[in-house]
Amino acid sequence: MATTSPTDNLKPVDELNYFELLAWLGIGSSHPGGFPATLKNLSTMDIKAEDLLLDAGCGSGLTACYLAKTKGCRVIGVDINPQMIEKARLRAEHENITHLVDFKVADVYDLPFPDNHFDWVLGESITVFLDKVKVYQEFLRVLKPEGHLADLEMALLQELPSQIRSQMEECYGKGTDPLPFQKWVDVLAEAGFVDVEVKNPQALQNTNSNLIVNALKHDWLLLKDLVPKVTNQPQIYRRLQNNANFMKRYKSYFGFGLLYAKKPVPPEPPPKPSLIKSFTSLLKKLGSSAYPFRYSKQSQ
Ligand SMILES: C[S@@+](CC[C@H](N)C(=O)[O-])C[C@H]1O[C@@H](n2cnc3c(N)ncnc32)[C@H](O)[C@@H]1O
């Protein structure tokens, strides 16, 4: 029988913001291109079993659990929404993968991890909603030198008229701000990343929505109590329909791609002036004591 979390029905659907709505649904792939796009992106990444990954804004943990299961690597997922984390943990238990994945409530602006900690930072539809340079600088901090960022985000294919932007913010929240691909690249470089590129760029109108829907049909966490939820709060249809209609109507403005970049190796720090001074005086001393020795050798 479906289990319902104690936090599942905190508010009526109409009062939930976009993230709360996603958390309430427990949907596993709420990013452009859905889980098929995740699979396509992962196939371009050389993730090894010994790698440590951070899934930043992990939602209900579908990608994190999939990665741990298929690659055997350790994954930490963080999300600011406690309901998402509760569901991600439930998913990990259901998939018997708790020995490899760990989920924490945390803010991506201030991650509870030391510097140079992760081999990979993954994101899927997270920085589009946030202050991009600040978040990328935080990702850079927790990545090891030569570690990679792989962030699937929405992009703008043409300028967005202000009235469409307002509608977008109504659907997805104030501050939602997809950038043109080139601007995403610039922002990553500004944050300090190198080797920045966009992998798998795609127009939204070329995505196969059947593939996305089919993947959703395998999302256990989404499906397990969807019927009672929809029965109790039928307004959910209108909320989801609004968002779907927006994207359908304006899809020519949007695309998405994998923003891929590397943390540079830090340059060697210049020697301290005091060290240079004592080294120079050491050389002088060595020079004066070596001179007679060289002289006596030459004179032999
Ligand atoms: C569109 S959802 C994507 C979730 C997941 N990555 C996926 O693809 O299904 C965005 C997620 O980012 C989380 N989020 C938003 N702001 C955050 C922040 N400052 N720190 C951590 N997570 C955040 C939300 O709670 C939400 O789960």
Image (spheres, rainbow, N blue to C red):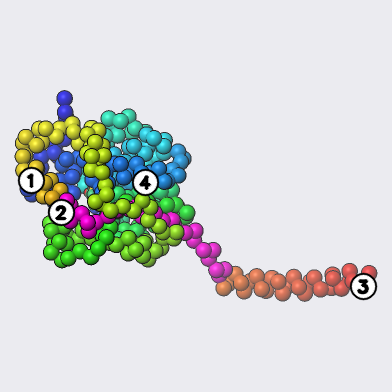
Q: Residue under circle 3?
A: 299
Q: Quadrant of residue 236?
A: top left
> Reading the chain from its start, which is encountered first: label 4 or label 2?
4
Left or right of 101 in this view: 87:
left
Q: Residue at x 29, y 39 (%)?
A: 62
Q: Is residue 111 visible?
A: no
Per the model, the C-alpha gap separating discs 1 and 2 is: 16 Å
Between the C-alphas of marks 4 and 2, the distance is 26 Å
Three-letter code, disc 1? Arg
52 drawn magenta: no
In terms of sequence position, does the residue under pointer 3 or pointer 4 come before the other?
4
Quadrant of the rendering where the N terminus is positioned? top left
Which dot, 4 or 2, sits closer to the camera? 2
Earlier in the chain: of badge 1 and badge 4, it is 4
| Residue 26 point in image, percent of width and height | 20, 40
Q: Which mark is residue 41?
A: 4
